[in-house]
Amino acid sequence: MSIAAETTTNHVVESLLGKTGEPQQVIAAAKALGQRVRGAMLSAINDRLAFSLDMELKSANVTRFADALPKEASHTAICVAPSASSSDALTMMIDADAAALLVSAAFGGDPDISVAPIQRDLTGIELTMLADLFDVIARTFEGSGERALGISFPLGEVITGSEIPR
C-alpha cells in the first residue's frame, strides 16, 4: 500500500472510530459526553416546559449514519447538525413517544396523565417547538474550547414523516 493510500485509509478509520480505532473507546467517550451534558441540557429543556422532565442516557453506539435513520416514514423527528469537518457532526432524534411527552409538557399538559405517542404528521407548531429543543441539545453538546464540536448554527430544519427515508 502506498503512503498516500495508507494515510487516506487511516484518516477514514480515524473519522469513523476516533484516533484509537477502538469502537469501545469511542462508545465510552460518547457515554461520558452524554453524562457530562445531561444536567445542563435538562435544565435548559425544563426551562421551556410547564413541568420538569428527567432523562437518562440509554445507550451510545458506533453506527453508520444511514443505519441510524428509520428505514420507513415515521413520526420520529430528526435534526442533523453540521460542522466544518462533518456534514453530520451531531444527529439528534426524538421518537414519537418523546415528542408527545415534550409537546404535552411544553403546552401545559397534566404530568399525571399518560401521553399517547404521536401517530400523525407533526404540526408546524410542534416542529417549531422540537426545533427549539434540538437547538438547546446541540448547543449543550457543542461545548467550548478544545472539546467544541464546531457545530454550525443555525441548525437545519427538522425532518419527519416521509422526508426521513430520503
Image (tube, grey):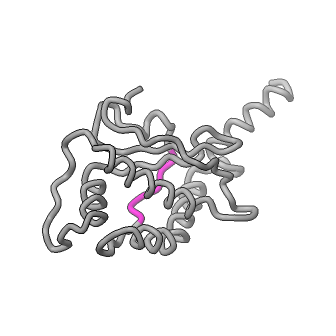
Identify the residue at the far front of this view. 125
Observer-nearest residue: 46 or 18?
Answer: 46
Instruction: Relative to 149, say whether 16 is above or below.
Output: above
Identify the residue at the far left of this view. 113
Q: Is residue 136 left or right of residue 73?
A: right
Q: Which quadrant of the structure image shows residue 51?
A: bottom left
Observer-nearest residue: 152 or 149?
Answer: 152
Principal secondary structure, stretch drawn in magenta: loop
Residue at image x 50%, y 46%? 91
The quarter in which the N terminus is drawn is: top right
Percent across and percent down for residue 45 are: 42, 67
The quarter in which the C terminus is drawn is: top left
Residue at image x 66%, y 47%? 21
Instruction: Relative to 10, say whether 166 is above or below.
Output: above
Look at the image and tell me whether residue 14 can be seen: no
Observer-nearest residue: 128 or 33?
Answer: 128
Q: Is residue 147 left or right of residue 78?
A: right
Residue at image x 29%, y 57%? 98
Q: Which quadrant of the structure image shows residue 101?
A: bottom left
Residue at image x 49%, y 59%? 137
Percent across and percent down for residue 47 are: 42, 73
Q: Which quadrant of the structure image shows residue 43?
A: bottom left
- Give the number of marks: 0
Percent across and percent down for residue 57 are: 42, 64
Is 61 one of the magenta-colored residues?
Answer: yes
Is 110 one of the magenta-colored residues?
Answer: no
Percent across and percent down for residue 147 are: 70, 62
Instruction: Relative to 160, say whether 140 is above or below.
Output: below
Q: Which residues are magenta?
A: 57-62
Look at the image and tell me whether residue 117 can be seen: yes
